[in-house]
Image (cartoon, grey):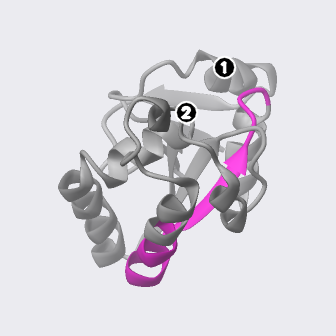
Amino acid sequence: MIIQVDSREQKFDHVTNYFDSQGIKWVKSKCVVGDYVNLENPMVVIDRKKDLQEVAGNVCQQHERFVRELELAKDLGYKMIVLVEEPNIKRLVDVCGWYNWRKKKNPKALSGKQLYKIMSTMTERYGVSWQFTTKQNCGKRILELLGE
């Protein structure tokens, strides 16, 4: 297995260190969509998010850009997996219980229930799969998902 890591991916040492420890070869270059691709099975792509706060930013402030990426993945026939590093979330429905710390300063900030609804709609419209992991287990989870 050879993994392509998007050249725009930031703070991913914990992932590539795991790849190195497992003898997995990886190359850094621009991906069409997502952040991680198994070059032996390029139809599955993973877009890694460091937490639900980043997801909230993607689906709100960067909504048009994020939707364009999901539409492109769908149009090209890719299976898009968004892997979120969030230790207390195991499945999509658990997002309902997420507390957005921004609500302390702005009561109109996105709630967990609102985020869940947006993510569910994106699954229905674009076929995106939302997966969750811890930062420590992220590299292992990426290999599992790309090996399927």
Point out the stretch of residues depicted in magenta.
119-136
Circle 1: element type: helix
Please state the horizontal and vertical placement of residue 102, each as a whole percent of the image.
45, 33
Q: Residue at x 78, y 55 (%)?
A: 90
Q: Residue at x 33, y 28 (%)?
A: 8
Q: Look at discs 2 and 1 and give the one toward the viewer.
A: 2
Please state the horizontal and vertical placement of residue 98, each as a whole percent of the image.
64, 49
Q: Quadrant of the N terminus?
A: top right
**Above or below — where is 70 with respect to 108?**
below
**Above or below — where is 41 with respect to 27?**
below
Q: Nearer the viewer, residue 99 or 135?
A: 99
| Residue furthest out toward the bottom | 124
Residue 35 in view here: no
Circle 2: element type: loop
Q: Nearer the viewer, residue 119 or 25?
A: 119
Q: Residue at x 35, y 54 (%)?
A: 59
Query: Hey, what amino acid is under mark 2?
Result: Lys
Residue labelled with disc 2: 50
Q: Nearer the viewer, residue 80 or 76?
A: 80
- Quick check: marks 2 and 1 in contact, CB under 8 Å? no
The numbered dot on residue 40 is: none
Residue labelled with disc 1: 14
Q: Is residue 122 magenta?
A: yes
**Above or below — where is 71 with respect to 57?**
below
The answer to whether 74 appears left or right of 42 in the picture is left
Residue 132 in view here: yes
Q: Residues within 10 Å of mark 2 (few under 14, many from 20)?
A: some
